[in-house]
Image (spheres, rainbow, N blue to C red):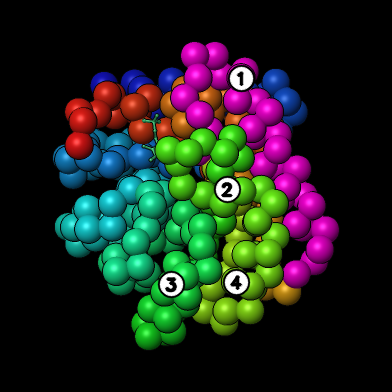
Amino acid sequence: MIQKNLAKVEENIAQACKRCGRDSKEVTLIAVSKTKPVTMIQEAMECGKREFGENKAQEMKEKYEVLPKDIKWHFIGHLQTNKVKYVVGRACLIHSVDSLHLAEAVEAESAKKDVISDILIEVNVAEEESKFGLKMEETLNLVENIAKMPHIRIKGLMTIAPFVENQEENRVVFRKLRELSVDIAKKNIDNVSMSVLSMGMTNDYEVAIEEGATYVRVGTGIFGERSLH
Ligand SMILES: *Cc1c(COP(=O)(O)O)cnc(C)c1O
């Protein structure tokens, strides 16, 4: 099932790239394996996947310990400062930094482990109350403050779009995130890149790609429905 699903998602990505004249190499599919067993990750690995997404720090750490080290783990969930120690040094990219307080904890843990942590800033473009992330207008200020931290590199922005019936409804959300990243890139802030746009999930990754996503995070479309957790 996973093999078939992966092939389908990859085909849809290729088609979306074609529609908007992008090279499909610009878009990386993160297989979101949260709540799913190690055996399913191994199955996806047999199909060549090496980029996986997790949203719980301890779960990511446990899977990290037992699975091959050539996996790239993306931390995509809300991160509490007391869990930063599980993620720094293990995740290739933390997608969900949304406060100075959290960035300070990532900086401190990265300094302690003598690593540089790549991060994205999570923006709540649609301003949904149920979601984490900064408001658009707060983003530049946080970027400027984090840019001064020697053990953190900002790579771009991330958003979680609302749940919608028709993915076209989220086009404006993705477009706004890209416009914000272009605006921030123009400031040429030292130590800050805006090359990554992490946006698009099972229900809306095609539109996200048309609007410039470089990472799409797909769980259900690859591993099937999750039971509540
Ligand atoms: C769970 C999750 C996803 C994947 O969601 P699907 O709808 O299953 O594709 C993507 N991004 C984040 C941040 C998530 O928590």
Apparent side of residue 170 relative to residue 79 in the rendered image (left or right)? right
Residue ID at (22%, 53%): 59
Q: CA distance from mark 3 to mark 1?
A: 34 Å
Q: Is residue 195 magenta?
A: no
Q: Check disc 3: other Cα within 10 Å, few if <14, some if 14-19, many if 20+.
A: many
Q: Is residue 171 magenta?
A: yes
Name the outermost residue toward the top: 166
Disc 2 designates what residue?
A: 123
- Residue sitting at x 73%, y 74%: 190
- Disc 3 CB within 8 Å of nearest ligand 1 atom: no
* Vertical comparison of 153 with 165: above or below: below
Please indicate whether residue 229 sits to the left or right of residue 207 in the image.
Answer: left
**Amino acid marked by disc 1:** Glu
Q: Main secondary structure of the magenta part?
A: helix
Q: Amino acid at mark 4?
A: Ile
Relative image position of residue 215 (x, y in whole percent)? 54, 43
Q: Which residue is mark 1?
A: 169
Q: Secondary structure at mark 2?
A: loop
- Quarter location, residue 2: top left
Q: Which residue is mark 4?
A: 146
Crowding near pointer 2: few (<14 within 10 Å), some, many (20+)? many
Q: CA distance from mark 2 to mark 3?
A: 18 Å
Q: Is residue 90 visible?
A: no
Q: Disc 2 marks which amino acid?
A: Val
Q: Which label's residue is closer to the chain start, 3 or 4?
A: 3
Residue identified by numbered label 3: 106
Instruction: Say which element carries label 3.
Output: helix
